[in-house]
Image (spheres, rainbow, N blue to C red):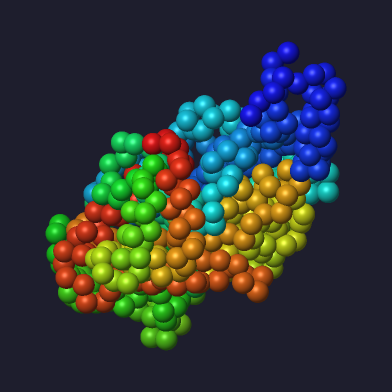
Amino acid sequence: MKPVTTATLLLALVGPAWAAGPADAPPGTLSCSGCHPTAAGVDTAVPRLIGRNPADITAAMAAFKSGQRPSTVMDRIAKGFSDDEVKAIAAWYGAQKN
Amino acid sequence: MTKRTNRREFLKSAAAASTFVALAKPAVAQGAGGRVVVVGGGFGGATCARFIKRIDPRITVTLVEPSRTFTACPFSNGVIVGLRELKEQQFGYDKVAAEQIVLNFSPATAVDAQGRSVTLGDGTRLPYDRLVLSPGVDIRWDALPGYTEAAAERMPHAWKAGEQTLLLRRQLEAMPDGGTVVISAPANPFRCPPGPYERASLIAYYLKLKKPKSKVIILDAKDAFSKQGLFRNAWKELYPNNLEWVSLSTGGKVTSVDPGEMVLVTDFGRHKADVANVIPPQKAARIAEAAGVADRTGWCPIDPVTFESKLQPNIHVVGDASIAGAMPKSAFSANAQAKVCAAAVAKLIAGGKPDEPRLINTCYSLVAPDYGISVANDYGPADGQIKDLGGGVSPADAPSGVRAAEAVFADGWFKTITAEVFG
């Protein structure tokens, strides 16, 4: 018999709801893909967030919020998210496979 | 660390695991992972079906939609004035089907909320554990005297993209220079709050270029509208001779129409039109009423965390048909709501408690092909409603470069969202 641990067995049984994916996206995360493409090859000036360094995303959001970084809509969208919320969203995007 | 497990230990592990699973996910009535039926294959429904399947592939997801081709409303004002072709608005469901979603190209005609089944046009009954309705809007044919389905062939609404869009385009193209285009805009709420004003702007752009002695008049049942300051400033700058807005308080409310005479009637007078675009009052599409999820307003009250109907259990409503508090009836809203609803539906089927969501709406309007304006807001549940948590419209005093950039971002947004929903 192959080695089996309780942990792997649990993971296998409860399935992908526990993997890093849309199931455990922090609040607000899935709204971003209305403008930031998930797939590569979409013809838009808006950058993809998938696979980006979380520190870059949190720094950009802080700069949008403070007005340091010029933007069109991101200064307005950044207003409604706390630093902790942004951190969670950035970590999730960073964990997605490019 | 892994270790070789003997049979007894293995059985203990398996028993622990199955107990855990049993707690996390109570048995559902049918199917190993539960059954979800989604009605409506637009920005809300197609998104919701795909995300439910991605979140929990064990759930059987059926998408019910009568049309094999979806025709998108956002950017269809560009089609009316010849900036785009209708085929650029059209999308199929091949990629949706490829995600193991069952496509059923039929109309949904009835819902048995107690027995939990949807009846299709051919009499087929689809049982569900949870139903998601994203049916969009229907025209209220009883709301504006004279405005019937036959009248819409002379005075198109063009508020559902497709043949109506092309009809309005042909009428504009055929109108001689010096003609008058009259747009009737309804009271709130209705699909795409800035839509009538973007349409008037782009028609004024077309007239200024092609038929400069012509004008477009908006007869409005409101005194205030979405992005009003931005639109009005832009109109003054770009279309001082081609566009006129008549507010409710200055006699803008259309009380009846006469399609034979091409006249729109208000309390203050009669407006003869060469081209009449009547954007009539609307309500949640018929299946919402049939399911018992629409209230007396004609729209569907929902729980702000799960989008579950406040009137019927196990039925969720997203998109234009829902009463989503401060969120406008837009494609972006429908798409964002659909993802929140998908997560909630998967959680509920697994016996869990859905998280408090956060949502965004971003909505661009074109005043001219190189002049974009936007509204962008964050939303979340509070006091049983979806509340606005911050955001706003484009700055009033932005240089032309910012307007041009927003027009570019608008174009990118359409490509991105349609890639997510249909690509």
**Count of numbered labels shown in the rendering:** 0
Residue B175: horizontal and vertical position, in percent? 24, 56
Image coords of residue B118 (percent x, y)? 73, 41
- Give the camera-side residue of B211 and B422: B422
| Residue that appears at 45% across and 65% down | A83
Relative placement, left or right, of B61 versus B126 is: left
Q: Is residue B122 left or right of residue B157?
A: right
Q: Quadrant of the C terminus of chain B?
A: top left
Residue drawn at (69%, 23%), measured in percent from left and top? Answer: B3
Residue B168 visible to an observer of this rendering: no
Q: Quadrant of residue B260?
A: bottom left
Residue found at the very far bottom of the displayed protein: B249
For the question of whether residue B38 can be seen, the reply is: yes
The N terminus of chain B sits in image quarter: top right
Q: Position of residue B69 (x, y in %)?
A: 46, 36
In the displayed structure, B220 sits above or below B404; it is below
Residues B210 and B74: in front is: B74
Locate residue B291 relative to residue A79 in the image: left or right: right
- Along the viewing direction, whichever of B23 and B53 lies nearer the viewer: B23
Q: Residue at x 62, y 72 (%)?
A: B382
Q: Is residue B149 above or below residue A51?
A: below
Q: Position of residue A39 (x, y in %)?
A: 38, 38
Among the 4 quarters of the image, the one containing residue B390: bottom left
**At x 31% / y 66%, what residue is drawn?**
A63
